[in-house]
């Protein structure tokens, strides 16, 4: 896990502090959950793209058509 610092308004901080207390968790955990909900799928897409690019760079002949890639991805999500 990496550490990062963010700035939020005093009002937001008060709200997060109250929510964290009510949910018996930390402000940091609330923020991690929110980021996962909002950006989780995009982050996974970036990871998948980087893996595919690395595979292509190692073996350019392994490239597949976009439609085939999307079909495989859809199948992996469904199954």
Image (cartoon, rainbow, N blue to C red):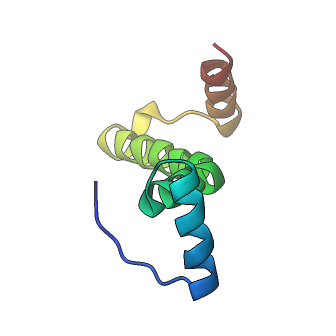
Relative to 75, is 31 on the left or the right?
Answer: left
Q: Is residue 9 visible?
A: no
Relative to 19, is 47 on the left or the right?
Answer: left
**Residue beneath the point at 58% across and 76% down:** 14
Q: From the top left corner, tell me how far across and down residue 75 is, in percent.
A: 66, 19
User: Taking 29 as reference, is 63 above or below it?
Assistant: above
**Residue beneath the point at 48% across and 42% down:** 48
Q: Is residue 34 visible?
A: yes
Q: From the top left corner, tell me how far across and down residue 31 is, in percent.
A: 52, 61
Q: How many marks can you see?
A: 0
Q: From the top left corner, tell me how far across and down residue 54 is, in percent.
A: 35, 45
User: Taking 48 as reference, is 31 above or below it?
Assistant: below
Relative to 24, is 54 on the left or the right?
Answer: left
Comparing 34 with 75, the one in front is 34
Q: From the top left corner, tell me how far across and down residue 7 is, in percent.
A: 48, 84
The C terminus appears in which quarter of the rendering? top right
User: Taking 31 as reference, is 63 above or below it?
Assistant: above
**Residue beneath the point at 67% across and 33% down:** 70
Comparing 52 with 19, the one in front is 19
**Residue beneath the point at 46% across and 50% down:** 25
């Amino acid at each position: 896990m990496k550490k990062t610092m963010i700035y939020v308004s005093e009002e937001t901080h008060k709200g997060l502090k109250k929510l964290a207390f009510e949910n018996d968790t930390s402000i940091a955990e609330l923020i991690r959950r929110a980021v996962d909900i909002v950006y989780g799928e995009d982050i996974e897409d970036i990871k998948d793209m980087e893996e595919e690019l690395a595979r292509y760079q190692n073996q350019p002949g392994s490239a597949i058509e976009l439609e085939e890639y999307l079909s495989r991805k859809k199948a992996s999500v469904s199954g």
